[in-house]
Image (cartoon, rainbow, N blue to C red):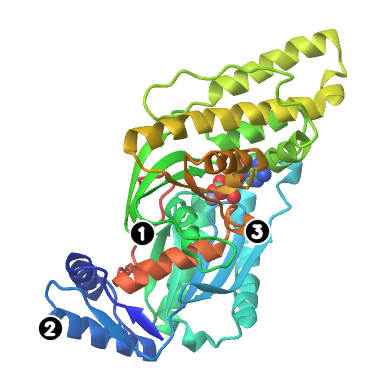
Amino acid sequence: MAYKVGLDGGALKQPIKKSRQQHQYGEHPQNYFTRFFDTFALQLFDSYFLVVTVNMDTYILGIESSCDDTSAAVIRERKILANLIANQQVHTDFGGVVPELASRAHQQNIIPVIQKAIRTANIQKSQISAIAYTNGPGLLGSLLVGTSFSKSFALATGIPLITVNHMHAHILAHFIEDDRQKTPPFPFLCLTVSGGHTQIVKVHSPYQMEVIGNTIDDAAGEAFDKAAKIMGLPYPGGPLIDKNAREGNPDKFRFPHPKVPGLDFSFSGLKTSILYFLRDALKKDPDFIQKNTLDLSASIQHTIVEILMKQLRKAVKETGISHVAMAGGVSANSGLRAAFTSEAEQGNWEVYIPPFEYTTDNAAMIAIAGYFKYIKGDFAAQDTVPFTRYGGG
Ligand code: KG4
Ligand code: ZN
């Protein structure tokens, strides 16, 4: 099977030099090839496009542990061989993720999940070309579990270590080879909506992503979860609001839209208005929420989706880019998916809607992001540390 080494001269030259300083290749057979082609590339191809054909598949082991899901995946080139997730139930009683409990649960889950992923992929550990793991943004204790495991695994096996930005990985999930999804062409816009982030990203390439819109307070997922909590629904509330909304009237209750300049978002005002609205309604009728759960859910979801779509439409207009993708946990939302589909049906946008399992946190997206770094030779050193906030890496 053929694989590309380097996408352009600059991209090829620099990371390989960096990786040579940072990473001591072990005597793994794949590393022999990597080392050989590094040398080959540096000596012969100073600044030109290079394609090398080798009869060896690239297998990436991906590890995700940034929040409350421990996930491991194995991909061969851009195809998934295994993508397993261990959810953590310990947080249910607390109405949100408890960081300390999350890192302890990751400690318990990480080895069995990885072992099972390797078994499911039906490969030997010695076939793995590199290990890619999330190094941020996320909860520090949780990130440290994936980080420590990955560093140890890389050291023990002598394979390269690759760090992956969780938010970039959500976007790059679109490049997993899967008949159920089509891959967007560059440049495209991506609405990246998760529990902690809400961004409009101009994606120039797998290596160059420009955030052109961001939330100034809460994220869209947080808005779903907080609204659900106010209504007395368990955490995470997003999927439950979605489920209820399917049977509710989205126009029954009206909530204000924020006034935010540019392409940014704000969701904290919505949370406050839901809180006050329900406080007043409950004074008149203590059963108001029970009687109106479906319509409340539909109206809240409709408001969040409209806030997102309004800014996205503006971004399409301003950039002239009409290839629009969605990523992150909130892109599992049926209302948001319907709004995208409607834009496509009206002929306004070409939309890219991923299968459900690539929207919420998963390690396949980490593995594919790792794959792109692998072909560029962009490896991490053993002293690399995780970061908690976007832009901190
Ligand atoms: O990307 P993700 O799995 O984890 C983070 O990186 O944060 O996103 C989790 C967020 C949570 O806020 C969850 O409530 C929300 O995604 N979510 C949904 C749906 N599924 C997950 N929100 C609305 N509708 C859904 N169907
Ligand atoms: Zn995520």
**Tag 3 residue:** 105
Tally of numbered tags = 3
Q: Residues within 10 Å of mark 2 (few under 14, many from 20)?
A: few
Q: Amino acid at mark 3?
A: Ala
**Disc 1 from disc 2: Cα separation:** 25 Å
Most foreground residue, 88 or 82: 82
Most foreground residue, 67 or 355: 355
**Disc 3 from disc 1: Cα separation:** 32 Å
**Tag 1 residue:** 206
- Residue found at x 63% / y 55%: 356
**Tag 2 residue:** 44
From this viewpoint, is residue 97 visible? no
- Residue found at x 33% / y 73%: 375
Residue 303 position in % (x across, y down) = 61, 26
**Toward which corner of the image does residue 83 lie, by quadrant?**
bottom right
Callout 1–callout 2 Cβ contact below 8 Å = no
Q: Residues within 10 Å of mark 3 (few under 14, many from 20)?
A: many
**Disc 2 from disc 3: Cα separation:** 49 Å
Q: Is residue 77 above or below residue 175?
A: below
Indicate the secondary structure of the residue bearing disc 1.
loop
